[in-house]
Amino acid sequence: MFLHGTSRQNERGHLEIGGVDVLTLAEKYGTPLYVYDVALIRERARKFQKAFQEAGLKAQVAYASKAFSSVAMIQLAGEEGLSLDVVSGGELFTAIQAGFPVERIHFHGNNKSPVELQMALQHQIGCIVLDNFHEIAITEQLCKRMEQTVNVLLRITPGVEAHTHDYITTGQEDSKFGFDLHNGQVEQAIEKVLQSPAFHLLGVHCHIGSQIFDTAGFVLAADKIFEKLTEWRETYSFVPKVLNLGGGFGIRYTEEDEPLPADFYVEKIIEAVKTNAEHFGFEIPEIWIEPGRSLVGDAGTTLYTIGSQKQVPGIRKYVAVDGGMNDNLRPALYEAKYEAAVANKLNTACDQTVSIAGKCCESGDMLIWDLEVPEVYDGDLLAVFCTGAYGYSMANNYNRIPRPAVVFVEDGEAQLVIQRETYEDIIKLDLPLKSKVK
Ligand SMILES: *Cc1c(COP(=O)(O)O)cnc(C)c1O
């Protein structure tokens, strides 16, 4: 069993996170329950930032809040000096409500609505990452109408796509995001943005993938961008102040995953940018990165109560828990793999292999296909590890199941940061039928 951060086995053979026995959390807050190891989030945040500080470089580490957004989480990111990526009006609203410094908010997305853009402009956020020509046009109009200007980055697709251990390079990238680096789109966008009095073009952005275990893709993206920067310096006298290389740093979900340390990704990115800047005669731009998963993923653990079991003779045993694809969509969506342990029986030997089923009316609602566990009974507590990213943020009310609560634990204390939904919440927006039947 691999334990992340402050997670450990205590004297009673129970799982403890942040100095708190998870059985007391389950008792107090119920299950399913998301538990975040706050010290681990802080450690990750500091590691990314320290790597830039040690290199003496100006940088921003922006938390990609789509991984897990809540008022308390955004406040934690603010406390740790991170910047923030938002990708929708809802994420932006959460950030504003959390009192996050607006000048450190960056707005992403491939179809930001005029209303969302207007909200971003009203709050004078740090920058808008322009994704397409439509957005350039409507943002420019809005700026005119609102008599203001805005800092922007251009999102480019560099033709490098990275996944786990490999990356692929394509001349032309087939992606819904950004301006293609190789077919003249970026140049057209640069011209439009530089011509407009509405925009201050800070630089360019790319995001090459997710759950990446290698640094080659980032280096290649930097190389490709710098080649173009030299052209743009000639043609447009444009020299970027900011180079944003996105997020996607991988984490360990299971023993198959071998992530690199946070600072190693940063060191390689710095090296690539420095080498290129020196080679082509640029000042080193501010480097921005956008970790999401790698800041919060392994800091999250979901606690479930075990309920029914079904033995299919000669095939497998299903063990069902009180959550599932409602609170963790990733196994159903991406066949994502997780590790787990019976949190109240950590020192009991595992002598059987079972499959962990969710409670939704969907055969695909399986959390883990083969898990070694001791003999388990209803009422035992299952802890699924590494659920901190894209867990709560993708949670849904399928089967009208209320979404779980979220607690932060740190230094032996627990703090409720998102309340459990109630059945009243479930029907809150429903309106009764206007009946036509007399
Ligand atoms: C999703 C996303 C991220 C974060 O990705 P992770 O894999 O969670 O690190 C960063 N930047 C952009 C533009 C994204 O869309």
Image (cartoon, helix red, strand yellow):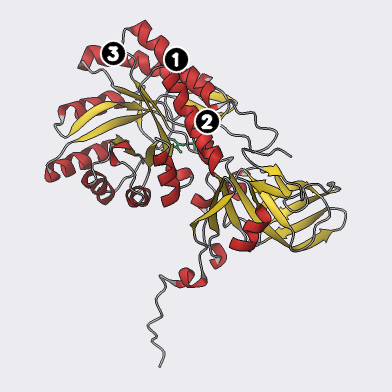
- Residue under pointer 2: 249
In three-dimensional space, the C-alpha distance between marks 1 and 3, rounded to whole angstroms, equals 19 Å
Q: Classify residue 405 as left or right of residue 86.
A: right
- Residue under pointer 3: 231
Q: Residue furthest bottom?
A: 438
Q: Earlier in the sequence, mark 2 or mark 3?
A: 3
Residue 298 drawn at (x, y percent): 59, 40
- Residue under pointer 1: 272
In three-dimensional space, the C-alpha distance between marks 2 and 3, rounded to whole angstroms, equals 30 Å
Residue 419 drawn at (x, y percent): 50, 61
Dots 2, 3 in contact, CB < 8 A: no
- Name the image quarter holding the N terminus: top right
- Element under label 2? loop
Q: Which residue is drawn at 65% across and 42% down?
A: 7
Tell me the mark number nearer the camera, choosing from 2 and 3: 2
Residue 299 drawn at (x, y percent): 57, 42
State yes or no: Cβ of the residue under disc 2 lies below 8 Å from any atom of ligand 1.
Answer: yes
Q: Classify residue 386 as left or right of residue 9.
A: left
In this rendered view, identify the residue nearer to me: 284 or 318. 284
Q: Quadrant of residue 142?
A: top left
